[in-house]
Amino acid sequence: MNIILMGPPGAGKGTQAELIKARFPIPHISTGDIFRDAVNQGSELGQEAQKYMSSGQLVPDEITTAIVKERITQADCEQGFLLDGFPRTTAQAQALDQSLTELGKKIDLAVNIDVPTELLIERLSGRISCQECKRVYNLNFNPPREQGKCDSCGSELVQRNDDRGETVAKRLEVYSQQTRPLLQYYEAQGVLFNIEGSRGSNQVFADIQEKLESL
Ligand code: AMP
């Protein structure tokens, strides 16, 4: 089962990915997490990615597609994978299709989580996450039991640098210009599944689960 999770920043892709992963045993591949880990490690990739991430821009396609291409050929992806935050441009979607064709695979479902812009801004401004296990919280809607600590692993919760101020506006603009057009790309392939994402995460997940189980 090869799945893509799509939607604007703050739509709840990370939260849904966690729920999907707990129910369906496929690896969760988040390009955002890969880049953030590289930034934290101070690697060459991290230094390059940081130049774009800090201003809400996309990391260049060649870098991003090479990472995903390599990742989906690993053994744990044989039974499927869940891509979160990739593809984000038409060039990335085409490169992904080409790699999948070479592997004799295809995308089974592109889940698009749709949320109105005002709610996205409210969600992003309250979002904090665990640097260790990546669990996502929201100070307004879904706070941790103990302030600043992850309920799951006890590690420190932090706000992402790119969830602040102007960077949020830039990310939303980049989404509508470069990523939103991809919905048509997957609709044309007959794999697009639109979902109303302004509801609670469990309700959203119930719909996704039903769809995945019907595949
Ligand atoms: P995310 O956690 O998915 O919101 O990603 C955070 C940031 O990482 C984005 O704003 C981009 O700078 C970068 N990034 C993540 N995924 C991609 C991608 N598929 N293509 C280009 N840049 C990406």
Image (cartoon, rainbow, N blue to C red):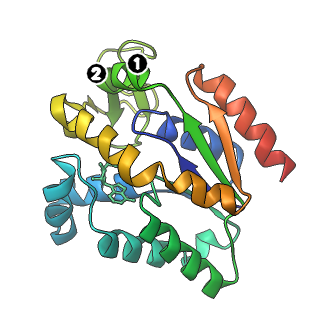
How would you rate the neighbour count of disc 1 (Cα within 10 Å): few for under 14, some for 14-19, many for 20 or more?
Answer: some
- Label 2: how many residues lie within 10 Å, few (<14), some (14-19) or many (20+)? some
The quadrant in which residue 114 appears is top right
**Relative image position of residue 3 (x, y in whole percent):** 64, 57
All told, the count of numbered labels is 2
Residue 148: give its label: 2
Residue at 30 percent across and 73 percent down: it is: 63
Q: Is residue 104 above or below residue 89?
A: below
Residues marked 2 and 1 touching at CB (< 8 Å): yes
**Residue 167 is drawn in which quadrant?**
top left
Instruction: Work out whether residue 214 can be spotted.
Output: yes
Question: Is label 2 within 8 A of ligand 1 (CB to nearest ligand atom)?
Answer: no
Q: Between 125 and 47, which is closer to the camera in this rendering?
A: 125
Q: Quadrant of residue 188?
A: bottom right
Q: Position of residue 206 (x, y in %)?
A: 73, 30
The quadrant of the image that shows the N terminus is bottom right
- Residue in view at x 36 percent, y 30 percent: 154
Horizontally, is 66 left or right of 191 in the view?
A: left
Name the residue carrying label 1.
144
Which secondary structure, mark 1?
Answer: loop
